[in-house]
Image (spheres, rainbow, N blue to C red):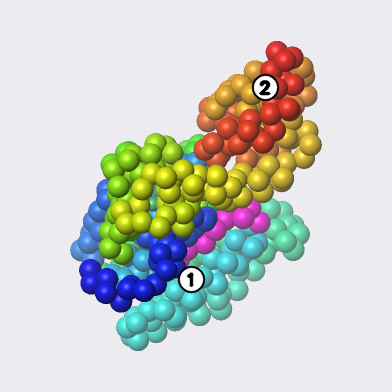
Amino acid sequence: MNTDFLEGLPLHALNPFMPGAGKQPPELVGRTHDLELMDRMIARTRLGLLDRGIIYSGLRGMGKTVLLLKLNDMAFEQGMVTVQIEANGDAEAEYDELMHELSLSIMRIRKPDIRQRLADVFSHVESISLDFVLGSAKVELRGPDAAERSVRASSYRLELLIEGLAAELGNNGLGLFLFVDEFQDMSADVMMTLITVQHKTGQRNLPFYVIGAGLPNLPGVLTKTRSYAERLFEYRVIGRLDAEAVADGFQKPAHELGYAFDHEALSRLVELSNGYPYFIQAYGKATWDASDSNPIAVDAVKRGEPVARAELDQGLYVSRWQRATPLGREYLAAMAAIGETCTSSQVAKHMNRSVSDLSSIRLALIELGLVYSPERGRIAFTVPGMDEFIRRVMPAEVQSYDGRS
Ligand SMILES: Nc1ncnc2c1ncn2[C@@H]1O[C@H](COP(=O)(O)OP(=O)(O)O)[C@@H](O)[C@H]1O
Ligand SMILES: [Mg+2]
């Protein structure tokens, strides 16, 4: 790349690193396989061949959101109809958002004739009166109240709409891609509808794909909602990056700008990042700002370290810690004292309480997205490094549990 135009700009003004939830990194490293998978899905869709949807699961800060955004871009660039939403647990709001985003996605289509045909599908579905379906004995709700009726109607509408759109798109070698972030938080009703629709469109050979992302418990939540969800999707774990990918995550953006990290700086940065994408951005940004040389040297890494740690504290840990109630914090501190993952009974023992005493606190922490249950009876932090943060910031609290055990 010709970097002449950068001449004279102060180094920090060029800082390419982007710490922050959902912020596109300058270089999306370690995701070649996922990008290829998407390329293949798009190519197959063009040929009228079907694939399974994809479910990504992983801890916070691993890069699920930016991966979904990237895959969305790829599909959109290739003329596919794409929609992206973030689940929030409120069925009515989720249905509204889906309808809204679907209508926007139709308007974004560049080819006027296809756009018109999809808009017709939309108006048709909007115009259908669902009263007769809702009133029939087949519907499990007898005399449902207004809110339930409206959720039911939304579910039918969404199903009709997705089927109609996918059928029309399929005739044109295109497909409908629905990206769902924080999928584990989705209301049971909407999740059920989406899984059912994915199932039915698959059977009818209609190109509709749910590409979801969420916490490590997501696959379990999906199969609990509908056992056949296990077969509907390809499940992929978004875990830590290997050292080579991490090194690329630092070096490539620097090279783009005519800079480099020297060998010692790079190996220290790889060590500090520990394979976590969010950490690459935080340490990359802080090191860059602390450097006044090219290549960037290890003393800049050292100077940047406390800044990066503060950035990670703010971006990943502090707000989550503050969301917990005092008792919730006690629970978290006990977990941190024990280690990265532990069992509910170890926590209870640490706190001198019974497991059942603590079950509602545990549930509240799960609902806040602070912890999750990797398997029955176990409990773990959703954010990598949260245990270390708590031990560093709350040494007194953590120690008091240590003393008791
Ligand atoms: N593959 C990657 N390479 C480099 N940086 C990444 C990568 N994936 C994510 N990041 C960075 O990590 C941070 C967290 O990404 P995000 O997608 O919000 O994670 P998640 O949704 O899993 O919590 C962002 O600053 C993003 O730029
Ligand atoms: Mg995310």
Q: Which residue is mark 2?
A: 347
How far from the left and from the top, in percent, is residue 105? 44, 74
Which residue ends up furthest to the left in the rendered image?
47
Mark 1 crowd level (few <14, some 14–19, many ≥20, 10 Å Cα): many
Which mark sits nearer the N-terminus, 1 or 2? Answer: 1
Q: Amino acid at mark 1?
A: Leu
Q: Which residue is mark 1?
A: 102
Give whichever of 63, 359 is nearer the camera.
63
Which quadrant holds residue 14?
bottom left
- Image point 54% across, 69% down: which residue? 99
- Which span of residues is magenta-colored? 83-90
Q: Amino acid at mark 2?
A: Val
Q: Is residue 84 above or below residue 351?
A: below
Which residue ends up furthest to the bottom in the rendered image?
112
Q: Is residue 327 toward the left or the right of residue 86 in the image?
A: right
- Image point 55% across, 40% down: which residue? 383
Is residue 145 visible from the viewing direction of this image? yes
Which quadrant holds residue 334?
top right
